[in-house]
Image (cartoon, grey):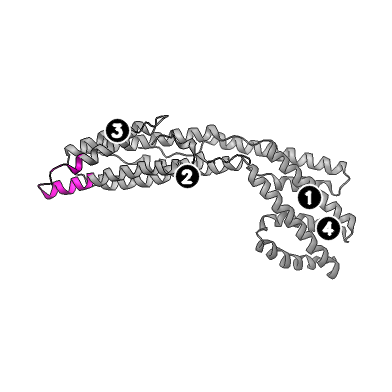
């Protein structure tokens, strides 16, 4: 049975460990900077830095902007509300009911927690002055600034992990095509289809990792991996359509042997470093051969040949997916079928 692909625990733990180290560095750097600048309370800068550390550079940058804007707005509303109603605990509830919906309305809900930290500090001072507002703004800049700096300083690369995922996926695709070829040569051949489930899981994981990899390349337009996993996802659906047609081939036919050879070639192509176009030529020749054959003499022959011809068209559609998506970038031009 094909083994369902699960994310490797070692890379996951490595990413978690790196993020913990980055968070610790950002927090301690923010705290000492706040102490140096005589900001109060200095530990709040560390809390803000912890909140600002993210898993990718792009996400970290977006997070810092959202948290900063949300905190400034929160500080503005809190200053007005506390000045008008006083520094009473019940006034905090008024602040929450007014401010939180506004932040959510303007897509700033991710900054609510950071904003709350700043506002509660303002409340603890018991007054609104220019010095206190300046202190809170500097705490924001120090905490979120260090988090952003650490996010940009180092992010683990996903290239090797993505290449390993691709290799595993292409191995599953190759196995699927070979099992289909065996079935055409011997319709009684049994296969449990485990590689289908495995391939689906791998594509989902690869797509997620490709997004993270792209978000770590802010100044680079990375398109290869997202396009690759998009292509494989569409091709997997095409393979499922092939299998539906294959289930209708209940007898061995000479045309089935020809398509089996085509599938064997496709099983090799999917793992090849460079695609030479041999499979597309075979599809073209087989279609021309099918059209030149005599009409079926029996109902059984008609049904099987119709399923085989539809299967051949589905192989062509599988290849056309690769041709279409390769146009998105030059890096896909030598991608296996």
Q: What residue does disc 3 label?
A: 264
Residue lying at the far top of the rendered structure:
273
How many angstroms separate mark 4 from mark 2 (CA)? 45 Å
Which residue is label 4 attached to? Answer: 122
Label 4 or label 2, whichever lies nearer to me, is 2
Seen as rendered, the residue at the extreme left is 297
Marks 3 and 1 sit apart, C-alpha to C-alpha, by 61 Å
Question: What SS does tag 3 mark?
Answer: helix
Q: Identify the residue shown where x is 78% and y is 39%.
A: 28
* Magenta stretch prevailing secondary structure: helix
Q: Where, by quadrant of the figure, is residue 15 drawn? A: top right
Real-space CA distance between mark 2 and mark 1, rounded to the nearest whole angstrom: 37 Å
Question: Circle 1 — which element?
Answer: helix
Please check the rendered image and state whether residue 209 is part of the magenta-colored stretch, yes or no: no
- Which badge, 3 or 1, comes first in the chain's sequence? 1
Question: Taking the image as drawn, is residue 187 in sight?
Answer: no
Judge whether residue 24 can be spotted in this image.
yes
Nearer the camera: disc 3 or disc 2: 3
Q: Is 248 displayed left or right of 272 in the figure?
A: left
| Cα distance between the residues tagged 4 and 3 | 70 Å
Cα distance between the residues tagged 1 and 4: 13 Å
Of residue 66 and residue 291, the one placed in the foreground of this image is 291
Number of residues whose C-alpha sits closer than 10 Å to that of mark 4, classed few (under 14), some (14–19) or many (20 or more): many
Residue under pointer 2:
204
Dot in front, 1 or 4? 1
Spot occupied by residue 69 in the image (x, y as percentages of width and height): 73, 55
Q: Position of residue 269 (x, y in %)?
A: 36, 32
Label 3 close to label 2 by CB (< 8 Å):
no
Q: Answer yes or no: do the residues labelled 2 and 1 have beta carbons within 8 Å?
A: no
Label drawn at residue 140: 1
User: Element at badge 2?
Assistant: helix
Per the rendered image, the range of residues in magenta is 289-308
């Amino acid at each position: 049975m094909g083994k369902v692909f699960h994310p490797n625990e070692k890379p996951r733990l490595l990413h978690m460990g790196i993020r913990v180290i980055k968070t610790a560095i950002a927090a301690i750097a923010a705290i000492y900077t706040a102490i140096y600048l005589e900001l109060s309370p200095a530990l709040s800068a560390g809390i803000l830095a912890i909140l600002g550390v993210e898993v990718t550079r792009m996400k970290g940058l977006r997070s810092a902007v959202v948290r900063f804007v949300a905190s400034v707005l929160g500080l503005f509303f809190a200053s007005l509300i506390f000045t008008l109603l006083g520094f009473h605990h019940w006034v905090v509830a008024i602040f929450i009911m007014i401010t939180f919906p506004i932040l959510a309305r303007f897509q700033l809900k991710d900054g609510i927690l950071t904003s709350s930290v700043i506002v509660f500090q303002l409340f603890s001072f018991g007054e609104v002055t220019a010095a206190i507002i300046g202190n809170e703004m500097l705490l924001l800049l120090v905490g979120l600034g260090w988090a952003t700096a650490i996010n940009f300083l180092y992010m683990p690369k996903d290239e090797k992990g993505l290449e390993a995922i691709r290799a595993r996926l292409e191995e599953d695709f190759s196995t699927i095509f070979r099992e289909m070829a065996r079935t055409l040569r011997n319709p009684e051949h049994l296969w449990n289809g485990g590689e289908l489930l495995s391939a689906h899981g791998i594509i989902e994981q690869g797509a997620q990792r490709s997004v993270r990899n792209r978000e770590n390349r802010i100044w680079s337009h990375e398109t290869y991996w997202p396009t690759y996993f998009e292509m494989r996802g569409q091709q997997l659906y095409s393979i499922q359509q092939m299998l539906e047609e294959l289930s209708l081939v209940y007898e061995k036919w000479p045309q089935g042997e020809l398509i089996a050879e085509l599938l064997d070639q496709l099983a090799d192509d999917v793992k090849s470093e460079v695609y030479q176009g041999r499979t597309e030529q075979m599809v073209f020749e087989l279609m021309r051969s099918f059209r030149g054959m005599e009409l079926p003499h029996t109902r059984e022959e008609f049904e099987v040949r119709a399923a085989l011809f539809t299967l051949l068209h589905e192989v062509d559609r599988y290849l056309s997916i690769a041709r279409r998506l390769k146009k998105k970038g030059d890096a896909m031009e030598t991608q296996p079928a």
